[in-house]
Amino acid sequence: MDTQNSGFAAQNEMLSFEKFKDGVLHDYYIACLSRETSLLSRKEVLTGKAKFGIFGDGKEVAQVAVAKFFKPGDWRSGYYRDQTMMFALGESNPQTYFSQLYADPDPEHEPFSAGRQMNCHYTSRNVAPDGEWSNLMETKNTGTDMSSTASQMPRAVGLALASKMFREIDELKQFKNLSDNGNEVCFCTIGDASTSEGHFWEAVNAAGVLQVPLVIFVWDDGYGISVPVEYQTTKGSVSKALKGFEKEEGTNGFYIAALKGWDYMGMVEAIDEGVQLARQTHTPVIFHIQELTQPQGHSTSGSHERYKTPERLEWEKEWDCMKQMKSWILKNALADESLLKKIENDARQNVKEAKEKAWKEYQAPLKELTQKTSEIVEGLIPDNPEHEDELRKIAKDLRSLREPLRKHSIQSLYKAILLCGDKATSEATEYMESLQQSSSEIYNTLLYDDGPKSALKVDVVAPVVPENAPTLNGYQIINKYFDGLFTSNPKVIAFGEDLGSIGDVNQGFAGLQKKYGTKRIFDTGIRELTIMGKGIGLALRGLRPIAEIQYLDYLVYGLQPLTDDVASLFYRSAGKQSCPIIVRTRGHRLEGIWHSGSPMGMIINAVRGMYVCVPRNFVQAAGMYNTLLKSNDPAIVIESLNGYRLKEKLPENLREMTVPLGVPEILQEGADITIVSYGSTIRIVQQAMALVAPLGISCELIDVQTLLPFDRDHMILASLQKTNRIVFVDEDVPGGAAAYMFNKVMEEQGGYRYLDVAPRTITAKDHRPAYGSDGDYFSKPNAEQVASVLLEMMKE
């Protein structure tokens, strides 16, 4: 029997009651299938075959009810207990579940992450291998899961917001592969304890304001690991705590309902009504699914008997959703005991067979690898007879492993090669290299898209600046750029605090909302998490959002979705899902503790997997936007705050020019010292260079342009080979981005070989910059400080 097909859902046309009955029995079969999967997978963890397990048992009936109303084109933004829902949707099955539990890296066996994520983390493909957007209306879509509690909430707002935009923006109606007039619903699932996170409340507030087709299911089993709900939530009930969010006539807000997680028919009827409401009217909905149980506790990391009373444990047995659904089926004469027993036995047998097949498929290549490696080790014996006993033992121990891993082969071979030293055969060393290379391809690839839609493969188009080109302020340059962009690319959407009505605090969008409408350029509340979430969701659905964080300091509020979701998305989906969000922000040089931060080291270490662009001016920024919009890559663009009113020449190809990412620009050639910097600090360095130039010091100034990626062609190294002196200047704290650049050039590029004097970093102070112009001068690098360092280097 097909593990996904009970046989009851594919009957010929019958009376409606018969069809209803068959649907119920099919749902019961899927619930049994999921329960057996949970029970058996726990055993696999406890016996050591799998590393860790977290399961959806106790939520089976609620999730088969939810799945009945999920249509192709809809999206799921969920958490790690949705296995029953995914089984019911046909998007997963027990065999792929066990393959993921074992961390099988074969994408044919584990299609969701190729062994990179633990069990119950799902994904769907939104771009084809060639980088073109898939037909999302033919698939049941899932935003790639992550474990961070409530992290699915911000992007869920964006996934639902996209439906609103596809319905209301005429220019988007042409993209039939992305939406059916905005009829898609985002199904968001979350555990009740995780509703204590700020992400939940910010997302609920944003969705209530926006009125988007978001349906949230809160699975409530009464606990957050060991902490009961009364310590988690006001009034001990999230639906009661949310009463003020309920929609009333003439207001926005949510439709909210509390349901019993064991009441199959009650949930089916209520969820049908709620999903229809969201789909048709874009009213957001919250279903608080109460009285769920945890038959096996929270996870394999501990037992719930430690913290639940005997009375609670007894109640959970009685009100287990599976027991209650079976009782309801019998009471309503939809099946007899013998038929239900057959369904249960079929599910149990099918799960057992799926588990065994998944294990066999996972182990087969590892055992082949073990055999091959042991033969290579034994092949060292003829040239190393003095080590025969040790080599035979290494090979024997490797072959004796009942459950080998890839690392065991590498460890054994490495040990053998070390033992043999110079007498190790070329066959052994080459095989070791091939093992390390193939392992790297399995586990260390796809952090960035390297396919046709990679930003690093965009053709370079230089700016064309005629002699009579007008000179404009920086904000006028970027304003003209965005005007042309919104005319030519209907998928571009921009939003942020003060972005719409007043055209952003620095006037980059001045007048553009009036021209292109409040649907494409709009203001948001002060909620950076969901500004990022909206950008993520819109990007996952094929739009090109520019999500603005007003000042660089505020990026901290929105950093979690970027680091946990966006930055790791391409990697953890094994290249199946792209999220081409552009985060626009501004920073550097503004005075005062709270608006002048430059936490670049924090950012570049938190968002590996995104690109970080640091343009010094606005022609350069426009070129970076063009590059990014031709790709599927996510990025942060940090515009220079003190550059908006500086004069620049306007290129005649502003919309066509591109800036290559990871390629520095030499702004001034020199012979004595290489100076490496970026952004607004470039202008401080230029002032310092003017101070030392009369003294005959010739400096080569390099603008890195992007910190991620950094100097792909080692242009800085070439400069250092010429000057033999180097200094890195920025306004991050000591040990921040300047230290990162130092590491890249000195260590990775081997720049230390070419030094005549000690290399330097010039940074801001450890403390936040003090307020006022003097505060800025003494807190961050200044021209005189930089000039003094340059003079010191020349004297050494």
Image (cartoon, grey):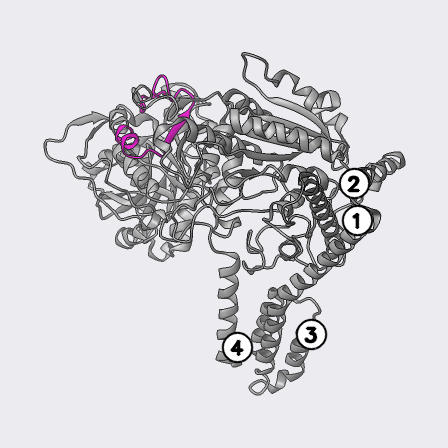
| Residue under the point 40% across and 19% down | 498
Tell me where residue 207 appears, x and y as whole percent. 53, 25
Tell me where residue 62 appears, x and y as whole percent. 70, 37
Q: Which residue is mark 1?
A: 340
Q: Which residue is mark 3?
A: 397
Residue 504 lies in the magenta stretch: yes
- Sooner in the amino-acid sequence: mark 3 or mark 2: 2
Tell me where residue 759 appears, x and y as whole percent. 37, 47
Horizontal placement of 403 versus 384: left or right? Answer: right
Whether residue 320 is visible to the viewer of this picture, yes or no, is: yes
Amino acid carrying mark 4 in the image: Ala
- SS assignment at label 1: helix
- SS assignment at label 2: helix
Amino acid carrying mark 3 in the image: Asp
Q: Which residue is mark 4?
A: 428
Q: Dot 3: few (<14), some (14–19), or many (≥20) neighbours within 10 Å?
A: few
Q: Which residue is mark 2?
A: 329
Q: Which mark is residue 102?
A: none
Q: CA distance from mark 3 to mark 2?
A: 55 Å
* As drawn, 303 above or below 593: below
Amino acid carrying mark 2 in the image: Ile
Quick check: marks 4 and 2 in contact, CB under 8 Å?
Answer: no
Horizontal placement of 526 versus 8: left or right? Answer: left
Q: Residue furthest top?
A: 250
Which quarter of the picture shows residue 235? top right
| Residue under the point 27% across and 28% down | 483
Q: CA distance from mark 4 to mark 2?
A: 63 Å
Tell how many labels. 4
- SS assignment at label 4: helix
Q: Dot 1: few (<14), some (14–19), or many (≥20) neighbours within 10 Å?
A: some
Residues in magenta? Answer: 481-509
* As drawn, 202 above or below 739: above
